[in-house]
Amino acid sequence: MTDEATYRPATPDDLPLVTETLYLALSWDPEDPIPPFEVVVSHPEIAKYHDGWMRPGDAGVVAEIDGAFAGMAYFRLFTDDDQGQGFYDADTPELAVGVRHGFRGSGIGTRLMQELGRQARNRGVPRISLSVSKGNPAANLYARLGYRWVSDEDDELMVLDLT
């Protein structure tokens, strides 16, 4: 299925895709439903991942199939005073990735993360972090792509060193 997908850099106009990506990432477990989209993306702890989209330090990659959104990976910098859940340090952007349900398991998530990693290296980003819930099968993908575990709490922190 990835042969059908096209990948492009995210733009400031992709804010709706950023919010959908967040919701997809948070709703990974069908056995643990989350509140409706509007409730989740407006929550202050989630809104910090999309408010002011394409501020300095933001970057992303969008996957499309036949012009329709299939998934996205993006990252955003946070500060010591305003941390995301996967905060490592102020020089390390935090990644979010989401693939629509009909396209999961097709390689799109892998390709999105690889493309975003290339963008990060081209920008001189030293590393990327992410938070992954225990039991999320995506943790296997992250490990396969070179992310390493750096904490063991309720949500686990993984980091990919790029230098």
Image (spheres, helix red, strand yellow):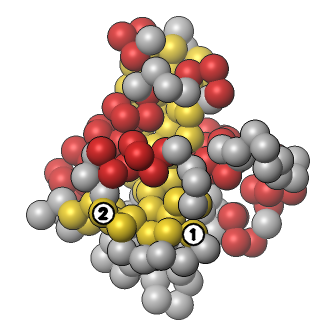
Name the residue at 57% across, 50% down. Answer: 136
Q: Position of residue 147 (x, y in %)?
A: 31, 57
Question: In this figure, which residue is indicated by the disc labeled 1?
Answer: 155
Question: In this figure, which residue is indicated by the disc labeled 2?
Answer: 148
* 3D distance between C-alphas at marks 1 and 2: 14 Å
**29 w.r.t. 75: above or below:** above
Q: Nearer the viewer, residue 43 or 3?
A: 3
Amino acid found under the numbered disc labelled 1: Asp
Q: Does residue 62 appear left or right of residue 68 in this picture? A: left
Q: Nearer the viewer, residue 156 or 66?
A: 156
The mark nearer the N terminus, 1 or 2, is 2
Name the residue at 46% across, 83% down. Answer: 79
Name the residue at 45% across, 62% down. Answer: 130
Element class at badge 1 = strand
Quadrant in the picture for residue 111: top left
Amino acid found under the numbered disc labelled 2: Arg
Q: Does residue 6 appear left or right of residue 14 in this picture? A: left
Count of marks placed on residues = 2
**69 w.r.t. 59: above or below:** above
Quadrant in the picture for residue 110: top left
Dot 1 alpha-carbon crowd within 10 angstroms: few under 14, some 14 to 19, many 20 or more: some
Looking at the rendering, in which quadrant would you find the N terminus? top left
Q: Decide if residue 60 is in sight here.
A: no
Element class at badge 2 = strand
Looking at the rendering, in which quadrant would you find the C terminus? bottom left
